[in-house]
Amino acid sequence: MWETGRMLDLTHLDRVRIRRAADIAPAAEALRAIADGMADWRVAALPSMTRCEPMRDAEGRPLASAVFGWEVGGDIWSGVLRRTLDSPLHVACRYESEPFWCNSEGFRTMAPNRLLDRIDLGSFERRSLVHAALVVPVHMPFGGIGAVAFIPRDPRQTDLAAEFATHADTLAAIVRPFITGYNRVTGDSLSLSTTDSLSRREVECLKWAALGKTDVEIGMIMSRSRATVRFHIHNAALKLNAANRNHTVFRAAQLGYIAMSA
């Protein structure tokens, strides 16, 4: 049982870590038990906003119903593709990488995030399916975003300030290995070279391409020929297994080589 105020130790962290498919159910049970020891919460886990399948254990059972106690299709992340453009929780997870809590009055974070202030909170409970929630987003390689939400069972409890102050850091520590481990075990392998890093010239060409510059314009900026610019971008595409120029820029941004223009 989790003791309030107790520091997270490695044994608890290891319990939620997923290294193989057989670990999924025990890790989910450990996550639920830790949450139960903190507060009277329901747990809802989302491995990736781009995947419409529910999280499943090694036997194919949905974790939402088999472990977290939701009715089939009843948790807040179900039907992700239908809700992802409308739910305030989904939108907030795209704009914030640290834990936050929210209700119909707004989002509360560890540090100010003005982007969250712009999110439409109209019909909050209908659109998000919660009255309040403490949410831990998990931002992963290649732009993947997962999340776990901790939702008070009591619909009258809408103020989670105390729970957030006490447990947010701990929940962030245990949610990340759970979500990232699940995606490593169940996700498709990526065809990407891990031995060939992009060269300085390749990165420079892609940086200007991300700003909308043409090959001719990049060549003028770098004092190189158009053919040389195309050569560098082509080489970068091969290393990143990208289908075209735009895909190359996107992959480079995902891996942190460049920043996408606003």
Image: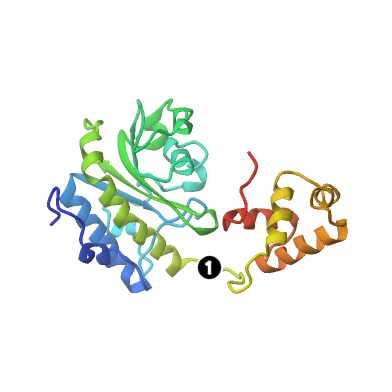
Q: Nearer the viewer, residue 134 or 46?
A: 134
For the residue carrying disc 1, how many other residues have a C-alpha within 10 Å: few (<14), some (14-19), or many (20+)?
few
Q: Which residue is found at the position 52% from the left and 53% from the top?
A: 50
Give the quarter of the image for residue 252. bottom right
In the image, residue 103 above or below residue 185: above
Q: Secondary structure at mark 1?
A: loop
Q: Position of residue 83 (x, y in %)?
A: 48, 41
Q: Position of residue 84 (x, y in %)?
A: 50, 42
Identity of the residue drawn at 61% across and 56% down: 257
Residue 153: tell me if it is visible. Answer: no
- Give the residue at mark 1: 188
Tell me the quarter of the image containing the N terminus: bottom left
Q: Nearer the viewer, residue 202 or 239?
A: 202
Query: Where residue 227 sits: x, y (%)?
Result: 87, 60
- Asked whether residue 260 is in view, the answer is yes
Q: Residue at x 22, y 32 (%)?
A: 157
Q: Residue 179 is drawn in which quadrant? A: bottom left
User: 146 or 205, which is in the foreground?
Assistant: 205
Q: Residue placed at 63% from the left, 38% from the top?
A: 262
Indicate how the structure is coloured in the image: rainbow
